[in-house]
Image (spheres, rainbow, N blue to C red):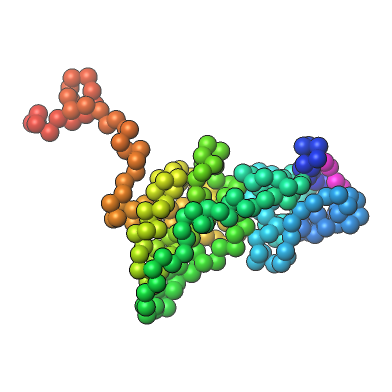
Amino acid sequence: MQISIFRSETNTHQNYRLPAGEIPLLSALVYIKETLDATLTFSAGCRASVCGTCAVRVNGREELACSYKVKPGDVIEPLQYHPVLRDLKVDKERAMATLKQGTTWLQEFREASLSHQDEKRTEKQTDCILCDACYSACPVFAVNPEFLGPFALTRAFRYTEDGREGDAKSIIDTIQTNGVWDCTLCGECTAVCPKGIDPKMDITMLRGESVKHGHADPSFATQSFGTPDFGGGGFGFDPNAGF
């Protein structure tokens, strides 16, 4: 079985032959490093889909190397929108900085009695392992590198929904620029999340909360909905024209 891996030194893909059999990609990478090419560089941690360290792209889709089973012809590449340190190892500092930019923590703690239902409301969002898969899959970063990104916005939603947050508006205010309205709601982030988190829905909910706090989609101001001269060449509606 042969797979192809991106090598940063040559900026090309290098082919490696593996023994037959279904094995996790991370095991394949370890095999290559130990027996075929000691220069191959990648990141690994818990090996149990908990830490998110080993996330890479396989055939153009984000996967955890420790859980993905290798198939013949697979093309392995580093995450997108991250500086490549070497081969499959990337610098996640810029991605992690979005959490700080989005002020994704309790702003004003208040005493609150949380029910089991309250805890369940944000349980899934709390499962984020910061693997950066959603960040890499997000097409918005191709045109706007300042976008906060899916996991920062999911974390923002998690805290705006926390009953102990006494100032949810400050979080909502922070995520208006390069935030909730810049998302295309394509759902790529949701599709690749290894923990089943749905950032697309979280962002949709944040848009609703934004409206409640007096914000609106800034792109509406530049959109044209026609002119109020129905029948005169436009497609608008004149409320004074009668029926």
| Figure quadrant of the C terminus | top left
Mostly what secondary structure, the magenta segment?
strand
Q: How many marks?
A: 0
Front residue (pair 31, 151): 151
Horizontally, is 134 left or right of 108 in the view? right
Q: Residue furthest right?
A: 35
Horizontally, is 163 left or right of 53 in the view? left
Percent position (x, y) of residue 4? 79, 43
For residue 11, what is the image quadrant? top right
Q: Is residue 95 visible?
A: yes
- In the rendered image of this protein, does residue 52 appear above or below residue 166? above
Percent position (x, y) of residue 74? 75, 46
- In the rendered image of this protein, does residue 195 appear above or below residue 132? below
Stretch of the chain drawn in magenta: 14-19
For residue 241, what is the image quadrant? top left
Query: Which residue corresponds to the image point at 67% horizontal and 55% vertical from the top-left?
Result: 55
**Is residue 15 a member of the stretch shown in magenta?**
yes
Q: Is residue 73 visible?
A: no
Front residue (pair 88, 32): 88
**Is residue 159 a member of the stretch shown in magenta?**
no
Percent position (x, y) of residue 19? 87, 54
Query: Which residue corresponds to the image point at 76% horizontal and 53% vertical from the top-left?
Result: 42
Query: Which residue corresponds to the image point at 77% horizontal and 58% vertical from the top-left?
Result: 26
For residue 59, what is the image quadrant? top right
Percent position (x, y) of residue 148? 50, 49
